[in-house]
Image (cartoon, rainbow, N blue to C red):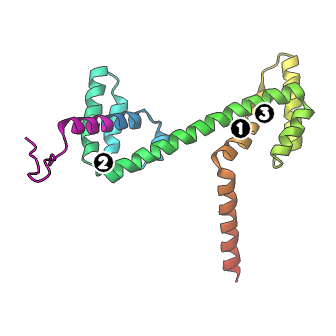
Amino acid sequence: MRGRDEETGEFLDISRSQNRRDALDVLALGEKLVSLTPAQLARVPVPEDLLPHIAEAKRITAHIAHKRQLAFLAKHMRREDEATLDAIRDALDVNSETSRREVAALHRAEDWRERLLKDGDKALSTLLEEYPQADRQQLRTLVRNAQAERAKNKPPRAFRELYQVLRALFVPAALGLDAVASDSDADADDLDDDSND
């Protein structure tokens, strides 16, 4: 029995149903952690003592054994304070938003590659208006070579390289890394100026 407050009649402890909902929430959080790639997991503030349990859950593939290991991971996660679990949830939300933006930027690179191959200089001019930092000559050469490869049924070397160049242009912009890089460059310049004084 949980007991009740004699004055208000409210329960003194959390209900078993709420405890179960909380436990299932932590289990779902553990499943998300296990599904992450090592690079994604590195960006999440997971306590060191949980990492071996996550690695073990990734390693085990047998269905029942995997479920048992997930439950064991969740048991250890429930021992962490709520602030740690909230930090993990927040990081996973940021990672999912970042992933969505990155995928959208990759699709955009594919679309622009097709536009450049179809419309040539007209599409290139539009692209350069939007991204003036892009290398006009490199893009023009890659478009020309990719069109020639298609016409002669050659391996798509320039086609792939064009995608890589467009990807390098779109992904940092989508993730907001251009502003971060320029800010860090400005900070580095300030440090150089200070050291010269």
Residue beneath label 3, please? 162
Is residue 47 visible in the rendered image? The answer is no
Secondary structure under tag 3 reads helix
Is residue 147 visible in the rendered image? The answer is yes
Residue sitting farthest toward the bottom:
197
Q: Please tell me which of labels 1 and 3 falls first in the chain.
A: 3
Other-residue count near label 2 (Cα within 10 Å), few / some / many at <14 / 14–19 / ≥20: few
What amino acid type is highlighted by mark number 2? Asp
Residue 49 is marked as 2
What amino acid type is highlighted by mark number 1? Arg
What amino acid type is highlighted by mark number 3? Leu
Q: Is residue 57 left or right of residue 165?
A: left
Q: CA distance from mark 1 to mark 3?
A: 8 Å
Secondary structure under tag 2 reads helix
* Quarter of the view holding residue 30: top left
**Residue 109 percent coordinates (x, y):** 73, 33
Residue beneath label 1, please? 167
Q: Nearer the viewer, residue 153 or 10?
A: 10
